[in-house]
Amino acid sequence: MRNKYRPTLLLTSLCILFLSTAPSHAVPLSQLLYNINSLNISTTISHISNHNTLLAHQEKRQEYEQEEAQPDRQVYLSQLFLASQLSMDLEDILDSPDLDSCQMCHQSMRLAKTFALQAPDLVPGLLRELCLKYKFRRPDTCEGLWERLGPELIGIFSELNLDGSDGYYTCAYAFPGSCPLPVHQPNPITFPKPKPANAQQPPPSGETIQVLHFSDWHVDPLYQRGSEAKCSHNICCRDYGRFNDPGPIKKPASKWGESKCDTPIALGVSALEAIQKFVPEAAFGIFTGDIVSHDSWMITQKYVEDEETRSYELFKQYLQEIKLYVALGNHDSYPSDQAPGKERPNSYITHKWLYDHVADIWEKNNWITSVEADYAKSHNAMFMTRPMPGLKLITLNTDLYYVRNYFTMLDTEQDDPSGLFHDLILELQDSEDRGERVWIMGHMAPVARSLPRSSILFQRIVARYSPHVIAGLFFGHFHLDKFIVMHDPDLPQGGRLGCQCCLPGTKCYPE
């Protein structure tokens, strides 16, 4: 009798992408586990060899049958043998009555890591097949997501420390319900200096300035007026060709956008035109991330670069001499959500094109200096600037604590593996020593969908440098008007620290 909670190796360990990025209408855990129970791993592995996504492997096998044995043939056949052996070992784990779902996940991940290291060529097709079989996403999405994330996920998975907490974090976040979410209490922070006694917020100057804050642009150059606005894709108002929903259009997309669609260019331009009306005397502006559309299964690096280039050019055209300070969002990278920290130089170099690209544009638009641009290029697009006397603005790349950034599943025993909070503390201490105020801006507030340890660390840092240094916290991402009250995590009553302001973004919302 198979254990009713048995997660498969391939779903718990290799399908990190499909489980953690599943939409709200995805298969619930109970149904997923029921489906897993009926999965015949041997049949699945045999089936994928005939799937069109592995046509190259099928042709290679036919070539081997006609030619003399070569070293490549032996490698390929050994990979197929490994897949077959892995399925039998997996059956032993899944049939064990002595293991709970979390233990099964951990043991399955060890087998999966071996598979990913020794037979990486077979992994993409297997993932696509499982995504299609269990309908985690639409067929076109299953194909596109793995094509884009596959190389990075295989590399990340091969580096997981399964003897430490990396495996536990991956099970808990990649396969919700298999293991409880980790309770990681970070170590106490050793600040450069103790907090001044009786630190007080300085009295207001009595002067008022206007500051422009907008977020989540998500412009869609493929938005098509009259297309389906209520579709089964992640975003609608597009012509998906043969992947369009069958039947007549239920709701035609309007010129100005729809609630389940990204921003049409007409709406984006209209919003920019309104700036002069509503913020006519803006001293400067802040943009809290997400230029690129939500079609993460379709985008390319060139698409991301072009969207960012053209959008920043448009911002500059309408803002003229108003300086705009930008934080990157999770959709501003390629692949979406992924950001290795600078402490992992071999991985960082593969993403440095993005930080070089945006920093060069920001410098060209005269929004930041060359020194600030150089810092951004080497610090995940983080930079510091002083938009006016007495005020420092610190931008954060919040992907560095986002649970859909799979690099955060590495080095989980460390409190600050990316070095983000270390750099933030140094900048805040510098401002305290100078007697200046600070605004912190980023894309995602460190609450929902952030690592628990990162949320606690951030709150402790804010507690140390409030109320005398930190004057404002500004974020986006939620697509809702939102104010988040922060508390000191180390006080019994959780003393209130302040509010984080989150904006809804440029989008058409239902009444």
Image (tube, rainbow, N blue to C red):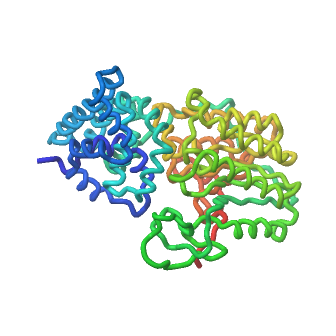
403 in relation to 154, above or below: below
Q: Camera-side residue: 409 or 164?
A: 409
Q: Viewed as shown, does residue 272 lie left or right of 144?
A: right
- Spot occupied by residue 179 in the image (x, y as percentages of width and height): 33, 45
Determine if residue 386 is in view.
no
492 in relation to 152, above or below: below
Q: Camera-side residue: 488 or 388?
A: 388
Q: Viewed as shown, does residue 439 lie left or right of 8?
A: right
Q: Camera-side residue: 128 or 105?
A: 128
265 in relation to 90, above or below: below
Count of labels in the image:
0
Query: What residue occupies the far left of the structure in this picture?
Result: 1
- Spot occupied by residue 226 in the image (x, y as percentages of width and height): 59, 76
Q: Quadrant of the C terminus?
A: bottom right
- Spot occupied by residue 276 in the image (x, y as percentages of width and height): 84, 67
Q: Viewed as shown, does residue 103 lie left or right of 383?
A: left
Determine if residue 466 is in view.
yes
> Residue 343 sits in which quadrant?
top right
Q: Viewed as shown, does residue 119 lie left or right of 414?
A: left
Q: Residue at x 45, y 52 (%)?
A: 21
Q: Residue at x 25, y 51 (%)?
A: 36
- Spot occupied by residue 369 in the image (x, y as percentages of width and height): 83, 39
Q: Camera-side residue: 464 or 176?
A: 176
> Residue 170 sits in which quadrant?
top left
Q: Residue at x 44, y 59 (%)?
A: 23
Query: What residue occupies the far front of the structure in this picture?
Result: 66
> Residue 424 sits in which quadrant?
top right
